[in-house]
Image (tube, rainbow, N blue to C red):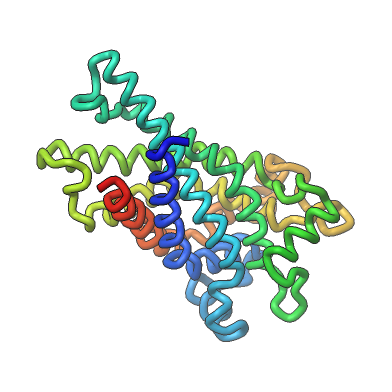
Amino acid sequence: MSTNTIKDLTAGTAGGIAQVLVGQPFDIVKVRMQTSPKGTYKGMVHCGTGILKNEGPLAFYKGTLTPLLGIGICVSIQFGALEYAKRVFAAQNITSGHGGEGGKILSGGQLFIAGVGAGIANGFVSGPVEHIRIRLQTQSNTNPMFAGPFDAIKKITSQHGIPGLFKGQCVTFLREAAGYGVYFLVYEKLIQREMLTKGIRREEISPINPVLYGAAAGYALWAVIYPIDMIKSRMQTDGFTPSTGQQYASARDCVRKVWRTEGIGAFTRGLGPTLIRSPFANGATFLGFELASRVLYS
């Protein structure tokens, strides 16, 4: 593994930790709203105050150990794969005489493909990590099935094998590929524009810009993936077998049943906390990555 890749993975980890600490309270509200029966919550505030009153403030960080470890790794993989793909495309651009100095000004298509690759690479880890987190976030507070993330992993694998951890994985790959293709395309194009219009290098960009561009990229991501994410949440909270309350035979079956029984509104339920969380969590992610990269590459 090259030193550049190690630096990118380390910077990505910094971004991932920042993302979890900022975004986790919003995420638990989103998941509860996505997975609860219609009419359980009047809205985001009702859901949030209910969690606070019934389970206390620490409930907003329920299942945080899994994302802290997992999303640290996930974001590290995303940025590691993205930066590697960018270097490959830059080398191609040099050969073909495109992309300016060092071939680094990538086309929209190149950035989208790099983002899709980053999303798929990330999906191998984010699928099981989010599955465990969602199980912990949605379990009963009075009669919990799992004592914590490691207990959840142990119980799921003992009953359903390793494939049990990867429940909802096809939907996860679809979400990651589509979402991160758009996410990194938007962010990198905004960074490119800032560099070109001001004639500056990447490390000279003001730290506020990664926050703003990260927020914009986050909104683009959720605009593309939210209905897919809702199906993923349903699949990952569903029973494993008909005897343990399985409702959906497949992702397609899930779409059909949700559409038929709950209508189109179900596909955007929980969108409020996501849209509030997104600029903070994604701004923090890119700021963490850019600042860590500057230190590591200086």
Which sits in the foreground, 96 or 217? Answer: 96
174 vs 295, left or right, is right
**In percent of the image, x 33 and y 54: which residue is there?**
292
Which sits in the foreground, 90 or 283? Answer: 90
**Where on the picture, by quarter, is residue 29?**
bottom right
Spot occupied by residue 123 in the image (x, y as percentages of width and height): 57, 43
Asked whether residue 181 is in view, the answer is no
Spot occupied by residue 231 in the image (x, y as percentages of width and height): 62, 49
Asked whether residue 239 is in view, the answer is yes
Q: Outermost residue, top direction?
A: 96
Spot occupied by residue 258 in the image (x, y as percentages of width and height): 67, 51
**In percent of the image, x 46 and y 37: which residue is there?**
81
**In percent of the image, x 51 and y 37: which residue is there?**
177
- Residue 51, compared with residue 179, is above or below; it is below
Q: Outermost residue, left direction?
A: 198
- Residue 176, compared with residue 144, is above or below; it is above
**Where on the picture, by quarter, is residue 275?**
bottom left
Spot occupied by residue 265 in the image (x, y as percentages of width and height): 55, 55
Task: Please tell me how many numbered marks the rendered image carries.
Answer: 0
Which sits in the foreground, 98 or 55? Answer: 98
**In percent of the image, x 53 and y 82: which residue is there?**
57
